[in-house]
Structure formats: C-alpha cells, structure tokens
Image: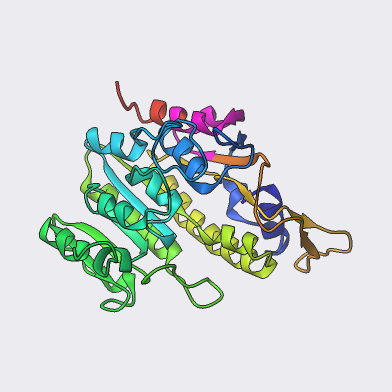
Amino acid sequence: MGLTQITAGIYDNNNYMNFERFPVTGLMKTHSYDNLVTDSAAGGTAMASGVKTYNNGVGVDKDGVPVKSILEEAEEANKMTGIVVTSSVVNATPATFMAHQRLRAFSEPIAEEIANSGVDFLVGGGKRYFDRRDTDDRNLYQEMIEKGYQVTDFIKDQKLSNIKFKEGKKFVYFTADDVPLSRIAGRNYLPTASEIGANFLKERSENGFFMMIEGSQIDLGGHATNTKYVLSELKDFDKAIKKILDFAEKDGETLVIVTADHETGGLTIKEGSKMNKLKTDFSYGRHTAAIVPVFAYGPGAENFSGIFDNTQLYKKMKMVMKLGE
C-alpha cells in the first residue's frame, strides 16, 4: 500500500477516505538487510522487532537468530495482544509478530509457534496448518482448545459477530482453510473483526493492549496488477480504519498507526482519469522499493512524522508503550 494506492482509493471513493482523519503523517523506508526491495517477511520483522533481516526471514536477524517482537514484549508487560488479518495467520506479516523461522515458507512450524505464542485474539485464515498438517499428526486446533482457548472457524460459526465469547478464554477464529476469499468474492469480516478485537482486548486488560490489523490482500491485488482488486481491498481496509479510529476517539488512550511493509505493483494513475473513474496502470507485478506513508493518531502520534526507517517504527512504538522500562 503505497501513496498511489491511497490516492487511487480516495479518488475512487468520492474524494474521501478515513486516512484523512489522521493529524500526523510520516514516510518510511522499507528496504531489507540484503535488498532494496523488501518482501513481507523482512518488512514485517523490521516493524515487529526493529531489526533488519534478509528477504524471507521471519522474526530472525540477518544471521537467522530469533529476535523478540513487540507483541511478545507486550505480553511480557502483561498487556493483551491481538492479530486480525485477511491472509492466512501463518503468512509472513502476522508470522513476524508471533514466530521465528529462517524461511517464511515453513508454514507448519510457524503454526506451531503461533499455537504457543499466547496471543489473546487471533482472526485469519490458515486452518489447515493447524488441524490437517502434512509434517506430523498433531492437531494444533485441538491443542489450543486444551490450553484454554476458545477456538472456532468459518464452518462452525459463519458470522463472527454472532459468537459469544467465553469468559476468561483467549479467542481464535479461522476464517478460511488457507487464504481467505477476496473482498470481491464475498469476504467481509475485517472491519467487524477489528472493532470486536479492540473491544475484546480493552475489556480484558488493565495494562492496555497491542493489536496488529492487516488488510493483507491489497498486496495480492498489486501482484495480480488488478486495480479493482486493489481498490476493493483498500476500501475494506479503510472501513476497518474507521472502526478503529472511532474506537480510539472514544477511548482517548489508544495510539493508532497505519502504514505498509512495502508497495506492490508500481501503480500509476494516468492522464484522462476522472473522479470515481480512474485510468491506471502497473509497472510491475511485484514489490517495489518505494517509500511508504505512515499515519498516526492518539497519544504519542507526534513521534511518527518525518522520514524514518522501518526499524524505527518498532522503536517508536516501544517508546510510546513504555516497554522495557
């Protein structure tokens, strides 16, 4: 999600999106340790742990050594933690907050680490990596229930908003067997799950919470060089941003940061475009090295202006959350 994706989203949405509600904006460099063009694993690790790593490395440094994530540090500080994504939960970005593997392709070891991560609220795809594994006969779905989690899925409970939470239990909801549907194909849980998750975590914590929400398929639309795909995912993500900003305004104690791990596709808005009727093109069906925007609202938001490295995002969040003090 680069600046052009956001521009296209605004101009294709009657000239307004909730990005405009943020009082503080910055710009973030995204390169990985070994490449100007990062992947989501290295980009996610930098944001989650403040360390540059090689492309494909999940929660490890350049030498493959595990590094602690801000989610893990929040847990150590007795804060609640949550992850909501429109990808599989074992995908690179969510994995960097909960797991440590030399390669992002190690989906089943990542699932095992997620099952042991202690995360309090988890929503996303990837059920098959937990209950129908290729590398062993373990049923991590059942193991999480035995650990005290309330675990359910898209087959048992089709609407997240209808689920009654069990008191004192952590919560996992698998939205798909692997990658969830696109928004165009009917997926619609992100805004609801974001709002429910924020309230779930706030109500159960005396020390605050850390939550990572990803509109994961904005990236897939870029890889597909499909503008309709990108815009539908961006608008869905914007609805989630609205839910969280409304929550934060009411709460008064929540810092909201919106950014991207990288830009995908080299999207261009071309001459002849009109409001709500854009002419677009892509230069490339892969990631680019473009600097990405950062938006901030709430206590400590002023720390996120200017141009800074993606490793600094972690350090700024850690400072505002007073972790490690």
Residue 241, image x and y in percent? Answer: 50, 54
Residue 272, image x and y in percent? Answer: 89, 64
Residue 300, image x and y in percent? Answer: 46, 30
Residue lying at 57% horizontally and 30% vertically, measured from the top left? 309
Vertical side of 321 occupied by 151: above or below: below
Vertical side of 47 occupied by 195: above or below: below
Direction from residue 134 to residue 271 in the image, left or right: right
Residue 224 in which image quadrant: bottom right
Between residue 12 and residue 172, name the one nearer to us: 172
Between residue 175 and residue 128, name the one nearer to us: 128
Tally of marks: 0
Vertical side of 168 occupied by 70: above or below: above
Direction from residue 136 to residue 2 in the image, left or right: right
Residue lying at 29% horizontally and 71% vertically, measured from the top left? 153
Q: Residue furthest toward the top?
A: 325
Direction from residue 231 to residue 319 in the image, left or right: left
Direction from residue 267 to residue 195 in the image, left or right: left
Residue 16 is a magenta residue: no
Residue lying at 55% horizontally and 58% vertically, measured from the top left? 238
Residue 312 is a magenta residue: yes
Visible in this render: residue 291?
yes
Q: Residue furthest toward the right?
A: 272
Residue lying at 53% horizontally and 64% vertically, measured from the top left? 236
**Which colouring convention does the figure follow?**
rainbow
Q: In which quarter of the image is the C terminus?
A: top left
Q: What's the magenta region? A: 296-315
Residue 322, image x and y in percent? Answer: 34, 26
Visible in this render: residue 200?
no
